[in-house]
Image (tube, coloured by chain):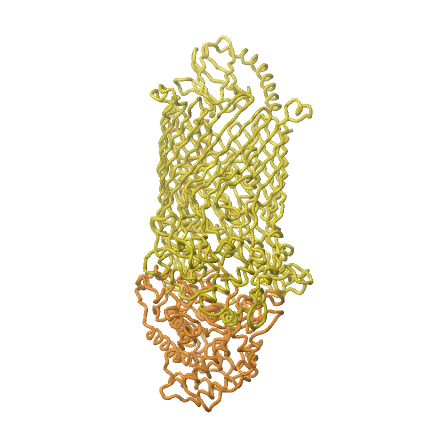
Amino acid sequence: MYYSSRKVFWLVAVWLLGSTTFIYAQTAGKSSGAITGVVLDSDKQAPLVGVSIIHSGTTNGAITDVDGKFTINVQRLPVVLSFSFIGYKKQEVTVNDFSKPISVSLSEDLSFLNEVVVTGYTVQQNKSISGAITKIGFSEANTNQTDQDFLKLLQGKATGAQITATSGTPGGGVSFVIRGNNSIGGSVSPLYVVDGVFLNTTLPVTGGGGNLLSNPLADINPADIESITLLKDANATAIYGSQGSNGVVVVTTKRGKRNTASKINLSVKQGWANPVNKFKSATGPQTGELLNETWVNTAQANNESLAAYLTREKPTNWDIVYPFKTGEGSPDFGRDNIANLPTYDRISDIFQTAATSDYQLSVSGGNATSNHYIGLGYAKQESTVKPNTFQRFSARLNYDNNVTAKLKLGTSYNVVRTERAKVRNNDNDPGGIINSAIFPRSFLPIYDDNGNYLNHATFNNHNRLIEHLDNSYVTWRNTVNLYGEYTFLPELKFRSSASFDFTNNGSRSFSDFSISTNGAASTSNSLIQVYTAEQLLTYVKTFKGKHDVNVLLGNTVNVQQSQGINATGSNFIFDVLREVSSGAVTTGSSSRSENRLVSFFGKAAYTYNDRFTADFSIRGDGSSRFGQNVRWGYFPAGGLSWNLGEEKFIQNLNVFDAVKLRGSFGYSGNQNGIGNYDALAIWNANSQGYLDQPGISPGRLANPDLTWETTQQTNLGLDFSVFRNRLNISLDVYRKYTTNGLQSVTVPSRSGYSAAIRNYSEISNKGIELSVESRNVNTTDLRWTTEFNISANRNRIEKIPQEQTFGATNRGTSILREGYPVNSFFLYKQLEVDRETGNAVYDDVDQNGMITYADRQILGSANPSFTGGLTNTVTYKGFDLNVFFYFTQGNKLLNMHDFFLVHGGIQNGIGFDANQLARWQKPGDVTDIPKMTRYTLNPTVNNSPANNYTGQVANLSSRYLEDGSFLRLRNVALGYTLPRSIVSALKLTRVKATLSATNLWTLTSYKGLDPEVSAQSTDQNTAGYDWATVPQSRTFEVILNITF
Amino acid sequence: MKAKLNIPFIRPLLFASVIWLGSCESFLDLKPTNSLLATNAVYDAATARALVNSAYTNLKGYSNSTAITLGVLPADNVFFAGSQSQNIELDNNAFTVTNSAIVGAFRSNYTLINITNWAISEIPKVRDEAFAAGEQSKLLGEAYFIRAFSYFTLARSWGGVQLQLAPTTDLTSLGSIKRSTLEDTYKQVLSDLAKAEELLPADDNTTRNKIQRATVRAVRAKVYLYTKQYQQAEAEATAVISNPKYELVKPYSAFSQSPYLTKESVFELSATTNNTGTSGSSWFPASGTPRGSYEFRPTNELINLLNNAAKGGSRKVLIATRGTDIYGNLYRTVSPNLDPAYVLRIAELYLIRAEARAGKASPDLAGAIADLNAVRGRADAELFAVGNANKEAVLQAIWDERRLEFAFESDRWFDLVRSGQAEKVLGVEKNFWLFPIPQADVLADPDLGGENNPGY
């Protein structure tokens, strides 16, 4: 930095010396003539390009060129020239003389009002924005956090965004929702736009059981990101029409700056990740004791002798009867027998200290006419649960060239290879590695006497999976934008761009004879192409110094095509031959699908005297997905803002440095979630049905009225600065109401269908968002800043066709019910465990004396009451310390781990979690875990052993529902930048070393491993499940940044 | 626009976009490449055949998995040793209104009914010379049979159900249909069977995996047994038993050997590698080859009965041992699953007739015992002593025989319910002898009046 600005300074100085003489010679002594000069940044003394100069009181103006130089012709002197530039304070200069070129220094405006924000299709100054837009600048501090995916890096940094990492798998799933769930049947994900390219968000790896295994946005290298803007309200998103209502995430990547010497950045990161907590199983003797107790209690409940019960019921498999394996006759219940049971530790086998590494090299800079940024990155992360790895290579070239004074061409080109290897479902998958380790009873051996893997009950051997998994999922992604921009007049520009996002997902996997009988291979390839052609005409002009007009007209054509092939092979002869073609039985399939979107949009804004802004935008979308009756949707929005800070009565208060009021209203839509041909009635065909003959059957009913979901949103905002711009506060309140919600409507089974997709439901969200930025201490040596944000959203289902339950593999533990938020948990409420009987007592809601379905109730939701983040940054001389907390409050989690492993003895062949040990054992015991029993008769009786773990309640008890709130020290990083003297001696520009720790500390009352989970998050209606999920890891990293 | 728009590019551009806007509608009209549009899906012989074939495919899919699960888990031959709660609930007879196996089964039957309703409504309209002689009416007969079979499954599992007899073209065409009584549901089954018999061509001597007139009569015998019309059940069973196309094969294990389709089978749904069948994967132990999940395990009681030479006889082949694991051994293929679904075996017709003969108004106990002993004799089990018979003992012996003869097929639970033994044998009170209607239907279908089966 220092190096380059010094260099620029000398360049400017030399230029000034040369040109001054020239100008002097030309202009001396004329009554009308040209004023020339240069505009510089007051701090850096670097020329400013594109500063607008207006002869006050006229429309006469000029703009500085690439060297910061300008010429303006005036009739007579003296004149007042007004200099304005985005992000800088406006300045007026009186000129009395043609003879001397003037030099004007503009100082940067620290007021938030002058911050420049990339919004939909435009760049705007904060002061003229009437919508709810949050900008997050990306810096080194953001990438200190270990996550390789920018969505996770946004968590706790932006108001209104609720971001949940669904598991601790690197490159794994993230749920990202802006201002609450708008949709039940459609998608709730925002639209992602990177440098103008609409990204496809098809998952590269999908798992079973609703498990979100991967995040396609991990394809974007966070080190390349300059800033991210979240568009949240209708005014900001209506311009994205039928894709806007879930919010829009606009990512801008780094570009070089013109007239800047090339700068080379190298960053190296090395880290070690560890699980914070591990699962705990009951030991062998404890498991034996629990089983023993189950038989005793059940026989007692049956009113029969233990011997009679066991003789009648004695299961056939040794793993179930092990503690009682004493042949016929009276079983021996001696404790010695149980105490001698061995304990096999499977859980330690699956965890590891995982290595993470990250290397980044970038070059950026520019000359007078062009600028460039080239970034290369490589990251590799291992999972703390074996054997999964994530790797990403990325290369980016951003280049802009002013071919002529009027024509500018440029590109953003990104190519990425992401590989996820040795992937195995964990979340919610009984075949997963975690489950294969935590399910088997701990007294059962892992290997037989010959060292062969042993399986127990239905579960695979965890070590077999770890050692034999052979699969990889490789994504190649090209995201490219090419644009040309022609300046007809300084105020009128036409921009045409073509972009495509081109994703190739290839996967291969082989299950050898150890994992699958006779082996199984599969390979698949899918190609997803998103093409966007975009034409934009913009007109931006200030009339008479106080009427700002900003008009945009545009058209886009968007085509998304996906096609895929898939081949499988089975019945292998040798498992050293691993390709599909070596299988005796092979299958192949292919698929193809396409959708198109044609859009026209416009936006007009008018600002009076920097005080009042009124804007209006509209977009018309025609989508191939919509039914033929409703092909075109129109989405209007408007907003007003008032810079109160410019008003005398505020200025006279002498409190505020700036105050701005914003208000907006409008409509945006959501078509994401409608399948490409969902509006059409189709029949399915099967070429190899019964006896290999072809078959056809009804597939889907027609829906010619199928269309977008509409969200109406009102937003009110207040921004203000006090204490000389050192404290900035921004407050937003909003109300959203979504109608025509896409909904899979249950239809009577007798129709032959189970559900049909309809525009039916209504859902509302309202909330409040507050963000505070404070420069607490701001001296040369010591700087301390604090950023705090908090967001609260209340979601409510206003209208649905009928209640629907989901979740936990069809157990219906999540419910959609009118008047309640989505993701509400629907369970039997356990009031207590009766101290005398040891049985669970449930809330008999309808007081009919029986426990039936009617007694299930909503007992909280997975939606937090509020979430937020707190970032403190302290720099002292060369040191900087960044401390970032994230918190979420009020969300419930269903602990499926306990659901399955605190089962009271009903699950045959399955072990126990250590929590089961706290069960009721004898009269007087106070606990919330009822006594062990397999008793199942009379399932509707309350306070009967039948409903402890099975029966009507079947484990759907509130005792598994826990508070998922937490406060987490997400990242703490301490950096040291070497003094310039040393760095210069090394012929470097900057050297910085950082120690970073991610997830160092967590405060939570949640009893599972980690509260930050969502095991079934492919479906937005089943959030808040913890089930065999890879926990977030604690990572320590050493980071070195060098600038040449 | 406030400024002059005299820029050469703009006007042609705007003009072009207006022209192009006109062509948008066709630009936005996309059709799928891999499914048929519903308008006119059944229009010729090939599509008519394909429609009926998909009814077979669905019937096979139901018979080789769901039917077995619902038939064995709630009863006493098999217990469930896995973790899926829907199966634990079935095993414990704690059926819930959201049990996914029960919900899925209910829907599968109506899906099948919708397919057959389409066939019954559309196939008569097709005019195509490519139909072989009588083929069109044969297809229609098959559709009637499959619809009857689905309603029979619904009736014995859920009681009287809503009789949906027209295809669903859109949801408004569903109309209002209340639940029928159990009696009326069986009447519908019998009426469909009668139509099927009338439409089907004469039987050939070899076909066992497609519907024949004899198949219709065999199912009718079973339906009459459920409606306790013993006279008719006996007559229908006799018609099939006397048909030389079918006989009890010996040894017992012969009917379940590849390539299957033995003379034992009256109706068997075959599997192919592309359209696979019943799997052994739930039954095989987790260690060793072929590997299974060992979730469906024979109970100790059943193992003892099958191993008892007098009772099980050669049927002890139904269980096998690997290491210390004893497992059910009727379905023996995994990846690909090539075991068929045994829908009706001639042994069942003997036992239907035995039960009908013993149960009818003037019992024919000798005839009943003869039929029972035909099955026992084939299995090399001890014959039932002819001398000291009373009606109850004979009936009990027949029911006990069914338990062993069809140990892992899909009837045990329904037999316990039908014979009124479910409470005595399993301790399940009568309210839970029928499965619950899915909660989703109770909520979505006003015709159900918000009511489920008693007890739920």
Q: Is residue A946 above or below residue A818?
A: below
**For this rendering, which residue is in front, A849 or B167?**
A849
Q: Position of residue A15 (x, y in %)?
A: 58, 17
Q: Is residue A76 visible to the viewer in this orientation of the structure?
A: yes
> Which residue in the rendered view is the most extreme toward the bottom?
B387
Q: Chain A is drawn in which colour?
A: yellow
* Horizontal arrangement in the rendering, residue A550 relative to residue A386 (left or right): left
**In the rendered picture, chain B carries what hue?**
orange
Place residue B43 in its image quadrant. bottom left
Q: Where the C terminus of chain A falls, by quadrant?
A: top right
Q: In this view, does A85 lie to the left or right of A705?
A: right
Question: A873 or B120: which is nearer to us?
Answer: A873
| Percent position of residue B48, x then y | 43, 70
Residue B136 in view in this figure: no
Q: Position of residue A12 (x, y in %)?
A: 58, 19
The quadrant the N terminus of chain A occupies is top right
In the displayed structure, does residue A880 sit left or right of residue B1? right
Query: Which of the 4 image quarters holds residue A145?
Result: top right
Residue A465: percent from left, percent from top = 62, 56
Circle count:
0
